[in-house]
Image: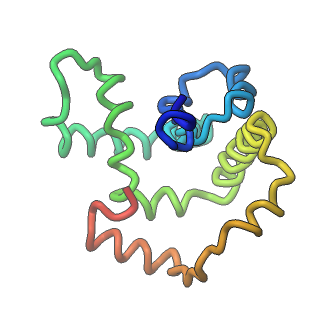
């Protein structure tokens, strides 16, 4: 209906992170044009068994000290941290990026496994020819990690 009556690309699935894994194969069938998954990947990092508990506790202390005004009366502590922890990424960026290599590798392996599963379910494997045909990405000159951390220190909202 979105395409036929209004000329739109199609439906957008918000909150896909909460769906069961067997639902993702339906998206290509119904031609969903956009699927929001960022929260799931963020959760995989924050809740990973190898993510340092002391770092998470310091991040949550930062939330308590700096974001208490965002807490609703109806929020449990767990709900409040869940909704606001994305705002700790910038202030703790250097520490997260500087986790020991084995910890980063373990988290990255789980993220890669999830990406692989989703790419298969969403039927995007083997589409490089389409990407090459329609996408012309500009050349990006990346900052070093140290430059990015320095910029984030100057701008607390950087990286959100």
Q: Position of residue 144 (x, y in %)?
A: 53, 80
Residue depicted at x 43% and y 46%: 55
In this rendering, does residue 45 appear at all? no
- Examine the rendered structure and indicate whether residue 104 appears above or below residue 36: below
Quadrant the N terminus occupies: top right
Residue closer to the observer: 87 or 131: 131
Quarter of the figure with the C terminus: bottom left
Is 30 above or below relative to 50? above
Task: Tell which of 56 and 31 is nearer to you.
Answer: 31
At 49% from the left and 56% from the top, the residue drawn is: 96
Residue 102 falls in image quadrant: bottom right
Describe residue 129's horizontal placement relative to residue 66 as left or right: right
Q: Nearer the viewer, residue 114 or 148?
A: 114
The quadrant in which residue 86 appears is: top left
| Residue plotted at (13% across, 36% down) | 69
The residue furthest front is: 5
> x, y (%) of residue 143?
50, 80
Residue projecting furthest to the right: 126
Question: Would residue 76 appear left or right of 6 to someone viewing this image?
Answer: left
Rendering colour mode: rainbow
* Residue at x 72% of width, y 44% of height: 115
Is any atom of residue 71 visible in this view? yes
Q: Quadrant of residue 90?
A: bottom left
Where is residue 85? Give x, y as percent.
Answer: 36, 40
């Amino acid at each position: 209906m979105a395409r036929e009556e209004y000329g739109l690309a199609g439906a957008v699935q918000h909150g896909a992170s909460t769906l069961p894994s067997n639902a993702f194969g339906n998206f290509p069938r119904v031609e969903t044009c956009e699927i929001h998954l960022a929260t799931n990947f963020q959760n995989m990092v924050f809740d990973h068994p190898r993510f340092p508990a002391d770092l998470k506790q310091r991040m949550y202390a930062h939330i308590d000290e700096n974001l208490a005004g965002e807490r609703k009366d109806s929020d449990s502590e767990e709900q409040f941290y869940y909704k606001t922890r994305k705002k700790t990424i910038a202030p703790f960026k250097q520490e997260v990026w500087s986790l020991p290599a084995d910890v980063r590798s373990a988290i990255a392996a789980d993220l890669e496994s999830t990406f692989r599963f989703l790419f298969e379910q969403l039927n995007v494997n083997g589409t490089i020819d389409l990407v090459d045909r329609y996408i012309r990405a500009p050349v990006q000159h990346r900052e070093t990690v140290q430059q990015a951390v320095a910029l984030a220190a100057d701008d607390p909202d950087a990286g959100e």
